[in-house]
Image (tube, grey):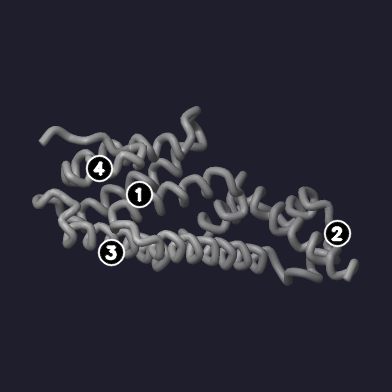
Amino acid sequence: MPQQRRAQVTRRAIVIAAAEEFDRVGFDATPLSAILRRSGVTKGAFYFHFPSKDAVAAALVRFQAQVWAKIWQRWTSRGLDPLSTAVELVDEVVRILEHDVVVRAGARLAMRDQDTVARWEQLLTGLLRSSAENGLLRPEVDPVAATRVLYATLVGVRVLSASRAIGAAQQTGEIWRLILGGIATADWLRNNPSVPAAAPRPS
């Protein structure tokens, strides 16, 4: 058991070190030596757990996918209306990306796959379409167009937040304040005082 525990600790150290280096300079610019130096493990110990740097990257991608699946399941099973689900889901995703380097590095690697990008847009589109069908969006709002604007803005926040004093979570609140004011019905805004970004628009 102690040996198994040590192996788990070593593997975790490698994954965290790789995530930190990938997050700092990118996957392509990260040499194996940087991961070894940051993790404090030998090359032999590394190859005991992973056959290559690409294998560590694949592990990070799998991990972030598992995190998002759990979050999606949790929020979609709470019985909230679809627009509230979209707000809460996005807010939690942004918070995790801001504070968890392992998930953030895995997500950045996953986003190199256009299918991953498309899946995220499809999930948000589904929630906003359901919001429209349930009368939560203003009649003139196209949920597909709203998703494109929302998604592009959120991606922009992720890119710019590293160089700004304002964190991604705070910027996301500002985004919701503007977007919800433009797409949500006055009734939804009035009935959701618990959503920090929601400010009722005059009828």
Q: How much space separates mark 1 and mark 3, taking CA atoms?
A: 13 Å
Total marks shown come to: 4
Q: Nearer the viewer, residue 148 or 47?
A: 148
Which structural element holds mark 2? loop
Label 3 vs label 2, nearer the camera: 3
The residue that mark 2 highlights is 42
The residue that mark 4 highlights is 180
The residue that mark 1 highlights is 87
Q: Nearer the viewer, residue 186 or 175?
A: 186
The residue that mark 3 highlights is 126
- Give me the disc on residue 117: none
The disc, 3 or 2, on the residue closer to the chain's N-terminal end is 2
Farthest residue to the top: give it. Answer: 165
Inspect the image, locate mark 4, and give the three-letter code of the amino acid beneath it.
Leu
Which structural element holds mark 1? helix
Label 1: few (<14), some (14–19) or many (≥20) C-alpha neighbours in 10 Å? many
Q: Residue at x 60, y 67 (%)?
A: 58
The disc, 1 or 2, on the residue closer to the chain's N-terminal end is 2
Is the Cβ of the residue at disc 1 closer than 8 Å to that at disc 4? Answer: yes
The disc, 1 or 3, on the residue closer to the chain's N-terminal end is 1
Q: In what quadrant of the picture does the N terminus appear?
A: bottom right
Q: Is residue 6 above or below residue 142?
A: below
